[in-house]
Amino acid sequence: MPIKKIVIVGGGTAGWMAAAALSRLAQSQLMQITLVESELIGTVGVGEATIPPFLNFNDRLGIDEAELLAAVQGSFKLGIHFVNWESVGDSYFHPFGNYGYAVDSVSFHEIWMRYRMAGDTRPLHQFSPETMAAMHRRFMHQDEGAELPAINYAYHLDATAYARFLRRYAEARGVVRKEGKIVTSDLHGESGFVRSVTLEDGAEIEGDFFIDCSGFRGLLIEDALETGYEEWTHWLPCDRAVAIPSRGDGTVLPYTRATAHSAGWQWRVPLQRRNGNGHVYCSSFMEADEATRILLDNVDGEVMAEPNHLRFVTGRRKKFWNKNVVAVGLSGGFMEPLESTSIHLIQSAIAKLAGVLSLDGVTPAQEETFNRLLGKEFSRIRDFLILHYKATKRDDSEFWNYCRTMDIPDTLQEKIDLFRLNGQVFREEDELFAETSWVAVMMGQGIVPGRPSAMAHSLDLDKLREEYEGIDKSIRYVVGNMPTHDQYLERYCPAAMAAE
Ligand SMILES: Cc1cc2nc3c(=O)[nH]c(=O)nc-3n(C[C@H](O)[C@H](O)[C@H](O)COP(=O)(O)OP(=O)(O)OC[C@H]3O[C@@H](n4cnc5c(N)ncnc54)[C@H](O)[C@@H]3O)c2cc1C
């Protein structure tokens, strides 16, 4: 059946990202795109930290960065500061960018290990421009700087304002928005494909293809098609969150902070005029009242709203694409926001969908390819998140005792074993997290290689010395010449009043 009408169900971050990305089709009149959302139901209202590939999404839509950041109270994010994860009182930084650079195919962290063994006491993070800039609360785009390395970054943004921004973008390009609560859906008798959804007021919206962005419930993918859900609670046991915004204190930090508590962890996401805060916790080990108290005790700045309580089950839909429905966003699956990966998974699903979508209709090959590729991406991210919980020395609560001793997927165990052996990290195909990310978390949480690899041993340290010192010096020079993050925001993208 040819595809002429696409219906997007839901107008949260996922719905409007999908609408904006596909709006070119609506504009060219190849397809009619309708988005249905219900103000009464609302959106999940969280999800404000992103990772670097998110820049490409907006860039491909031709969105001006400064304009976007001003509209969404945006700030720059250089990485994540993890506090209390290996043990209470310690911390490390997971930067968006590399440590130094590889020499003769030997990764920089291995070169660093060689110098370290030879008595050099500098920490690895001193060779990461993103970490050094974050520590000094500085930021600047690459093109304004001296000759040195590209600063990798992402954004913190107000999720509601971002959806509003994309709505304007998509509507201007032909996407039609319908307000109303969907109460039923109708399936074709023979194929079982979704034919239409019906709103509370009786209006029926027909479609050839449906993108389910209805949030955790999965209105079409689950309620209508009963696709099933694969739970990952054994490895990622947190299942609740309580979120609250607080007033900023005038300094906007260029990084997210993730602080581990006794049965979960707390995020702080700094926007231009407020901080987003939340406590992700495991209900088997902590009650909601205690989680809220811990959050409020640890929030910086005056709180600005009542706590927002959320429930979730970590895992993924057994199929993201089922018949003529593709689940994008929370309807497709959820892993806690420890590494800010949910919006990325929305972006990735949209990119894959745009790649395989055909005007001629739906085929099993499309469904199969989409499900396999997105499934792999979910699993790799899952392993990376589990690492944070598994690699702990904490024994101060039942929750941490559980995490420290739990079984982990073989794929993750293999990665840890290889790294312990000689510091190697192999990136699987187009896995999202690159070597630096794995190194940052493993080293940050006490997984230390026994010895550098044979290749690293073959390097002549004396010959490398000048280059090694050069990296350190250049980073100090570049970071030293950056404006503060606050100064840069003020100059480049001060929050528009409408974004408050
Ligand atoms: C605690 C927490 C923290 C998070 N932090 C981050 C983060 O830092 N970074 C990140 O990348 N991601 C984060 N996420 C994930 C992120 O919030 C989501 O991926 C993102 O907001 C997308 O949500 P969504 O659009 O899929 O769903 P929602 O925001 O829930 O939107 C669902 C939409 O469907 C509509 N809808 C539902 N039912 C009906 C109906 N019957 N009729 C009509 N319309 C309907 C709703 O009105 C709404 O418009 C976090 C999630 C949680 C739970």
Image (cartoon, rainbow, N blue to C red):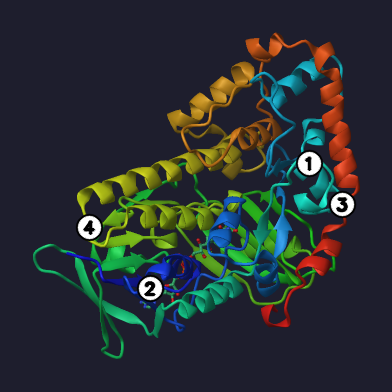
The kind of residue on which mark 3 rests is: Met
Q: CA distance from mark 3 to mark 1?
A: 11 Å
What's the residue at 41%, 64% (across, down)? 216
Which mark, by number, is residue 482? 3
- Dot 3 falls on a residue whose secondary structure is loop
Disc 4/disc 3 C-alpha distance (Å): 51 Å
Q: Circle 2 sits on which residue?
A: 26
| Residue type, mark 4 in image | Val
Q: Are marks 2 and 4 in contact (CB under 8 Å)?
A: no
Mark linked to residue 362:
4
Task: Give the Cα separation between the discs numbered 3 and 2.
Answer: 43 Å
Which of marks 2 and 3 precedes in the sequence? 2
SS class, disc 2: helix
In this picture, residue 284 sits left or right of residue 481: left
Q: Callout 4: few (<14), some (14-19), or many (20+) C-alpha neighbours within 10 Å?
A: some
Q: Residues within 10 Å of mark 3 (few under 14, many from 20)?
A: many
- On screen, residue 438 versus residue 22, left or right, reads right
